[in-house]
Image: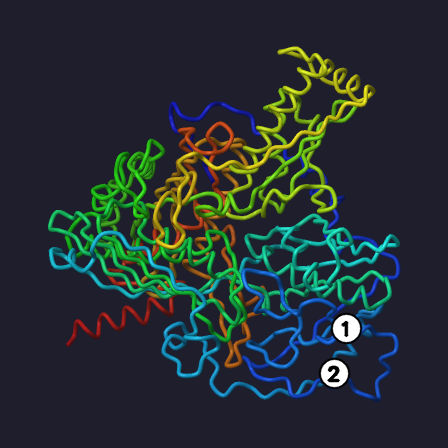
């Protein structure tokens, strides 16, 4: 059961129009990449390494097997650079000799018959010399004598404010904690897949499931050596992503492209099976946080000190970006004069980790919020009151040294969450419950946090995003941008923004298919930037289109759709251009120093307070979520139903992160539970009632003050749930997932220490 609670006096009574992509999906007309019909298609597969790093001594194709009808591609067939274009060119498209993790691609095969392809794979033999001592743990990597890269550190960041060492001398209460978070699989419904077709005009067309078509375009240009005017990247209907289809589609696209080029023009389809997808694609970075908090006797924070490290896996990929956000969000939404956060992305022999909803913030926020509850316990304070005492106010200085302006609602959203959840009443009721002879313990926990929307600091300026709006002779308006619909509702939200700005019916505006040959680069579909950043550009372009129609076509200030159509037809017949554009311009006060981590990190923050009520079985130590309240200030909900769905989805993923999802690795660094039967995620039976509270203050950088909300709901569930478990069982839980086995070990350890 889910309830949307509209905060009194805040949310307008607005309609949530039907999703523009809804009908095609529920009727089965939408074509996902594996549904696209092709004549003469070759099916492709990948030959991979089996060890956690080492050397390929020999790759042998059985000479007794007929390889004539197969297309075979190895590293020697790459016409361009053998590296996936990313932040650094360290990850090969195909391994030539040295590899760093199990599952690295060594060669590619393609054949018209999938069964023959499966047979052929058994006739390829790989002889490897494995690494003597592969590294899989963060601290082991930092201390290792043998290194994958210099010092085994991809990136080392420092956020430093005030004087932590001096503040420690003045702190009256000190806690020191070590907290761990695991890897987590995005588990999008549709596995990764790409199609490559060399067209008659010589253009190589790549179509598939992806978030960032221009990332793929750049990777293809580097790998194939083709000019961009001979490359076309098209997004097919995409069945979920959550960050997992940000960088890895570039790898699959390059593989499909190489096979298509060598095949002489035949189309190639490369679709991963679920188990392969789980084993080799990027997941959430595991983390290790060493946290020290100091406060005075009144509970006022004196210092926050965190050593935050994430497992980057075998190649750098997106780890610096994930680390940056984790470091910036590590101090939370709190007022503190002395803060030090050291962040490191560490090399291991796992497959590379990558983007996943919240990217870095869920890991560091978990560490801080669990530590805050430990501090509250040591101070003998209620956790909510400790937070209230330290939350940022307008006029405070933020952890990055920026002056907190009017767009700060940390206090208000905490108060609303406490009110809606009946926090204090439930807390009292659970004390009574736990004192009685029941079969379960109950607890209530909370987390307060904020999440910045869009790229960090100068990232949006670097992207220089653009959008086009094209009006046609019949009055239809087309949005041309590179941002993708992947189930999150962007196609509807962006159309709604344009239609609202143009004062036209929703049916008169549509979002063009994302095709790099047609649309401008409006940046990747990541970082909760689509509605806020791209939506703002679409709104500006719509205003420019109206102004153009008024100046050049005589459109009245107020008009009917028929009058709009007539002006478009008249201008088109007279040869006037009906295309307008808008380009990103940063806020005037958007000043950020990437080296010192100081200044304004994000154009807008969304603020949240999440409260979890749990019940733990005394015998099995199984945890059940009784109720969950997710309260957030989001600026403006363009489409309230879509916003609610985003928050519900994030909360459910957060519950999985906290209680169920556990990536297990075998001794070779291969994911052992690579099936949906043994990688456990929550179902509707595991969720409990959700209360979604939307507070709208309209101060964000998006249309009508909208902020990004896609990442935000991933940050709060895990610490809120763990804090509730700690309250219920009176034990310290320092890692997730908080499975019964872990709770049993902790309970036994606590009983043992009490007996000594």
Q: Left or right: 506 with respect to 351? A: right
Q: Residues within 10 Å of mark 1 (few under 14, many from 20)?
A: many
First in sequence: mark 2 or mark 1?
A: 1
Q: In 3D space, how far apart are the residues under numbered discs 2 and 1 (Cα atoms)?
A: 10 Å
Q: Position of residue 575 (x, y in %)?
A: 81, 23
Q: Position of residue 604 (x, y in %)?
A: 42, 38
Residue under the point 74% across and 68% down: 79
592 up-or-down from 730: above or below: above
Q: Left or right: 749 with respect to 719? A: left
Label 2, on which residue?
A: 124
Q: Residues within 10 Å of mark 2 (few under 14, many from 20)?
A: some
Question: Could you tell me which secondary element the residue under label 1 belongs to?
Answer: strand
Q: Left or right: 381 with respect to 64? A: left
Residue 635 sits in quarter:
top left
Quick check: marks 2 and 1 in contact, CB under 8 Å? yes
Residue 18 sits in quarter:
top right
Question: Could you tell me which secondary element the residue under label 2 belongs to?
Answer: strand
Q: Position of residue 279 (x, y in %)?
A: 59, 69
261 up-or-down from 584: above or below: below
Please name whichever residue, 730 or 501, is drawn nearer the observer in this view of the structure.
Answer: 501
Q: Position of residue 108 (x, y in %)?
A: 73, 72
650 up-or-down from 340: above or below: above
Q: Is residue 645 visible?
A: yes
Residue under the point 61% across and 42% down: 522
**Mark linked to residue 141:** none
Please name whichever residue, 162 or 45, is drawn nearer the observer in this view of the structure.
Answer: 162
**Mark linked to residue 109:** 1
Please name whichever residue, 301 or 670, is drawn nearer the observer in this view of the structure.
Answer: 301
The colour scheme of the drawn protein is: rainbow
Q: Is residue 738 visible?
A: no
Residue 564 sits in quarter:
top right
């Amino acid at each position: 059961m889910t309830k949307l609670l509209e905060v009194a006096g805040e949310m307008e009574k607005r309609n949530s129009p039907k999703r523009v992509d809804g009908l095609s999906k529920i009727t089965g007309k939408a074509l996902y990449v594996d549904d696209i019909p092709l004549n003469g298609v070759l099916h492709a597969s990948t030959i991979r390494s089996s060890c956690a790093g080492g050397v390929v001594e020999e790759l042998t194709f059985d000479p007794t097997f007929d390889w004539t009808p197969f297309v075979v591609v190895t590293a020697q067939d790459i016409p361009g650079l053998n590296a996936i274009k990313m932040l650094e060119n360290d990850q090969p498209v195909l391994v030539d000799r040295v590899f760093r993790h199990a599952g690295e691609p060594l060669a590619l095969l393609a054949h018209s018959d999938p069964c023959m392809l499966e047979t052929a794979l058994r006739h390829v033999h790989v002889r490897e010399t494995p690494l003597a001592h592969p590294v899989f743990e963060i601290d082991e990597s930092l201390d290792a004598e043998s290194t994958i890269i210099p010092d085994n550190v991809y990136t080392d960041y420092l956020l430093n404010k005030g004087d932590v060492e001096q503040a420690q001398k003045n702190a009256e209460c000190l806690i020191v904690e070590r907290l761990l978070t695991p890897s987590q699989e995005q588990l999008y419904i549709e596995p990764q897949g790409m199609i490559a077709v060399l067209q008659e005009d010589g253009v190589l067309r790549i179509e598939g499931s992806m978030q960032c078509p221009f990332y793929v375009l750049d990777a293809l240009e580097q790998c194939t050596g083709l000019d961009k005017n001979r490359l076309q990247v098209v997004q097919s209907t995409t069945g979920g992503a959550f960050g997992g289809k940000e960088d890895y589609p570039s790898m699959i696209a390059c593989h499909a492209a190489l096979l298509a080029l060598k095949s002489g023009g035949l189309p190639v389809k490369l679709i991963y099976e679920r188990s392969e997808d789980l084993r080799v694609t990027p997941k959430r970075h595991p983390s290790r946080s060493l946290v020290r908090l100091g406060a005075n006797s009144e509970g006022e924070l004196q210092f926050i000190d965190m050593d935050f490290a994430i497992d980057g896996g075998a190649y750098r990929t997106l780890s610096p970006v994930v680390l940056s956000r984790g470091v910036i969000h590590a101090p939370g939404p709190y007022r503190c004069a002395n803060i030090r956060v050291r962040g490191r992305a560490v090399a291991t022999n796992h497959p590379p980790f990558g983007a996943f909803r919240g990217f870095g913030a869920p890991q560091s926020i978990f560490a801080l919020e669990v530590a805050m509850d430990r501090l509250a316990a040591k101070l003998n304070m209620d956790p909510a009151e400790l937070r209230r005492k330290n939350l940022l106010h307008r006029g405070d200085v933020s952890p990055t040294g920026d002056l907190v302006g009017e767009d700060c609602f940390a206090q208000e959203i905490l108060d609303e969450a406490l009110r809606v959840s009946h926090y204090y009443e439930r807390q009292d009721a659970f004390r009574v419950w736990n004192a009685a002879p029941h079969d379960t313990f109950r607890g209530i926990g909370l987390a307060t946090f904020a999440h910045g929307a869009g790229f960090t600091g100068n990232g949006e300026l670097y992207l220089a995003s653009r959008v086009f709006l094209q009006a046609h002779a019949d009055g239809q308006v087309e949005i041309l941008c590179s941002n993708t619909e992947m189930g999150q509702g962007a196609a509807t939200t962006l159309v709604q923004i344009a239609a609202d700005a143009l004062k036209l019916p929703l049916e008169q505006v549509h979002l063009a298919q994302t095709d790099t040959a047609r649309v401008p680069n409006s940046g990747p579909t990541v970082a909760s930037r689509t509605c806020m950043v791209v939506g703002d550009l679409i709104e500006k372009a719509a205003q420019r289109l109206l102004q153009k129609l008024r100046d050049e076509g005589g459109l009245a200030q107020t008009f009917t759709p028929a009058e709009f159509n007539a002006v478009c037809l008249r201008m088109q017949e007279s040869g006037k251009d009906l295309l307008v554009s808008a380009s990103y311009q940063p806020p005037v006060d958007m000043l950020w120093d990437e080296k010192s981590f100081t200044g304004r990190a994000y154009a807008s923050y969304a603020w949240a307070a999440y409260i979890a009520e749990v019940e733990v079985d005394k015998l099995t130590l199984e945890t059940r979520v009784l109720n969950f309240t997710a309260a957030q200030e989001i600026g403006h909900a363009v489409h309230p139903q879509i916003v609610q769905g985003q928050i519900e989805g994030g909360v459910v993923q957060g519950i999985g992160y906290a209680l169920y999802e556990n990536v297990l690795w075998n001794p070779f660094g291969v994911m052992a539970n690579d099936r949906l039967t043994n990688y456990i995620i929550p179902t509707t039976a595991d969720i409990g009632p959700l209360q979604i509270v939307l507070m709208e203050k309209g101060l964000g950088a998006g249309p009508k003050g909208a902020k990004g909300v896609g990442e935000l709901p991933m940050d709060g569930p895990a610490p809120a749930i763990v804090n509730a478990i700690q309250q219920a069982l009176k034990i310290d839980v320092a890692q997730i997932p908080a499975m019964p086995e872990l709770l049993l070990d902790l309970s036994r350890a606590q009983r043992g220490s009490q007996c000594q």
